Amino acid sequence: MLIKERKAYPIVISKESDGFFYVEIPDFDIATQGESIADAMEMARDAIGLMGIDFMDDGKEIPEPGSKEVIADKDDIVTLVDVDFMEYRKKVDNKAVKKNCTIPYWLNVEAEKAGINYSKLLQEAIINALGISKKVY
């Protein structure tokens, strides 16, 4: 099941007495919280992304935005958060992928003597080659 489009889901943010912001995500019947409104929105996006890829992995249909009634009190904030499930999967799906590479025998001998971790070195080299500043492994 491929989800190629970005979807925007309604959320309800409520300020709690402890200063945190409680977030309800009706379409997924889940909730989360954040330290600020921006953090609450990011936590909602993360929760929706995780639920969405779990649904995909289980072969279930991902709920459409607005599939459930949004109930809010007068002081609550009702807003939307967008999620691109395929992009989210790329960011969080950190399973290892086996790649084979060939190096000269003499280089292998020297690398093993030095205790080189091939996987880590290759990851770092690819990150450098792509100009990615954040470690994603």
Image (spheres, rainbow, N blue to C red):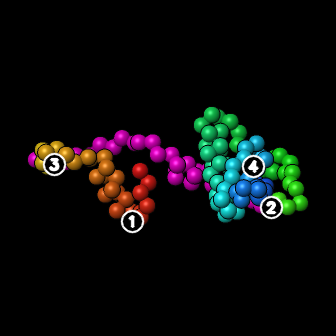
Label number found at residue 107:
none
Q: CA distance from mark 2 to mark 4?
A: 12 Å
Label number found at residue 131:
1
The mark total stands at 4
Q: Confirm or deny contact between disc 3 and disc 1 (CB under 8 A).
A: no
The question of residue 60 being in magenta is answered with no
Regarding mark 2 in the picture, which secondary structure is present there? strand
- Which residue is denoted by mark 2 in the rendering? 77
- Which residue is denoted by mark 4 in the rendering? 25
Rate crowding at label 1 as few (under 14), some (14 to 19) or many (20 or more) other CA atoms within 10 Å.
few
- In the image, the segment drawn in magenta is 77-106
- Which residue is denoted by mark 3 in the rendering? 114
Residue 117 appears in the figure: yes
Q: Amino acid at mark 3?
A: Ala
Quadrant position of residue 6: bottom right
Residue 5 appears in the figure: no
Q: Amino acid at mark 2?
A: Ile
Rate crowding at label 4 as few (under 14), some (14 to 19) or many (20 or more) other CA atoms within 10 Å.
many
Q: Which of the image's four quarters has the N terminus? A: top right
Is residue 103 left or right of 52 when viewed as pictured?
left
Is residue 16 left or right of 118 when viewed as pictured?
right
